[in-house]
Amino acid sequence: MNYIGSKLKLSSWIYEEIRKVVGHDLSDKIFCDMFAGTSIVGRTFKSHVKKVIANDIEYYSFVLNKNYIENHEKIENQHELIEELNSLPLSYDGFIFKNYCHGSGSGRQYFSDENGQKIDAIRLKIQEWKKTKKIDEKIYFFLLASLIESADKVANTASVYGAFLKHVKASAKKDLLLESANFELTNSSHEVHCEDSNELIKKISGDILYLDPPYNQRQYGANYHLLNTIAKYDDFTPKGVSGLREYNRSNYCKKQIVAHEFDCLIKNANFKYIFLSYNNEGLLSEEQTRDIMQKYGTYHLKKKHYQRFRADKAQNRNHKANSTYEYLHVLKKRI
Ligand SMILES: C[S@@+](CC[C@H](N)C(=O)[O-])C[C@H]1O[C@@H](n2cnc3c(N)ncnc32)[C@H](O)[C@@H]1O
């Protein structure tokens, strides 16, 4: 999935840098991905560590992590289930079609009419299967993650869900095809949370803490609201032209309090090794970050030149450059 701040292209670099500090064999280590987003960093470590703890405040991310991280045993009938969902008749009065497609008169066009109706049909059937216990929790999250990923591929947006496009773009005209969100099988089990990082940090401990908080004011809950709506499938009145739902406002997106928030997170972390991914155009400066981290132990910084993820088209971008530096701040904490 195209995701703001995704570490898809950086995850192998992060993995190597972490091994240089912690050691090559991570098999007895507990690794926590505290701001897990798409789950890609946790996935990179999943088969190399004893346990992954993944967390994100957003529910769609929780769903992705429940599948890609917590699921670790084979699902026997996954192909039959995916096939059955793909051949369902369309649903004409579901929440997505009614509120986010043009043909229902909603005034919004996040999906073509057929794709909106197909999302509704699949989502309703997954819920029915859960209710009648045809599927267990493991399969429920596998199917939901598959739906989120497949729906995102045919979304009629420039990239995030802050706005839809006036005309249906070519990729959004394609028929939604539910594809399996395949996860890695491991012998060991993993743990997934959906909490504010600064609350969760007081309740967990481990060896390696990987932090990838938002680095600017753009709230993920607003930019990806429709993924939460598909994942939760609850009833609410969508607001305004974009059809927003109530969303989380992360303290990491607020200039005045981000430094204090980050300081508390590091202070309360019961982890020996802490790694922070941050961007050189973030709300916290390089110096501020260093000053906070080095209060708690031995600190150093790694930098990598990196081609940015472009959420907006070139004409209306207000970023300064096409490429940027990705920072990996490293702390060996005094415990
Ligand atoms: C830069 S993205 C992480 C990207 C992720 N590493 C990936 O590669 O997909 C930041 C994430 O932090 C989450 N987030 C923001 N504030 C949070 C908070 N206070 N606690 C937990 N998660 C938070 C957002 O929902 C978002 O998914």
Image (spheres, rainbow, N blue to C red):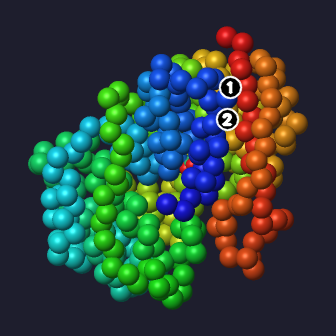
Q: Is mark 1 within 8 Å of ligand 1?
A: no
Kind of residue at disc 2: Glu
Q: Are marks 2 and 1 in contact (CB under 8 Å)?
A: yes
Above or below 157: residue 58: above
Kind of residue at disc 1: Val
Identify the disc placed on residue 150.
none
Disc 1: CA contacts within 10 A as few (<14), some (14-19) or many (>=20): few
Disc 2: CA contacts within 10 A as few (<14), some (14-19) or many (>=20): some
207 or 147: nearer the viewer: 207
Q: Picture coordinates of residue 114 (x, y %)?
A: 31, 81
Tag 1 secondary structure? helix
2 or 47: nearer the viewer: 47
Count of numbered marks: 2
In the picture of the structure, the residue carrying the numbered disc 2 is 17
> In the rendered view of the protein, which quadrant contains the C terminus?
top right
Identify the disc placed on residue 21.
1
Tag 2 secondary structure? helix
Q: Picture coordinates of residue 299 (x, y %)?
A: 79, 25
Q: Residue furthest top?
A: 335
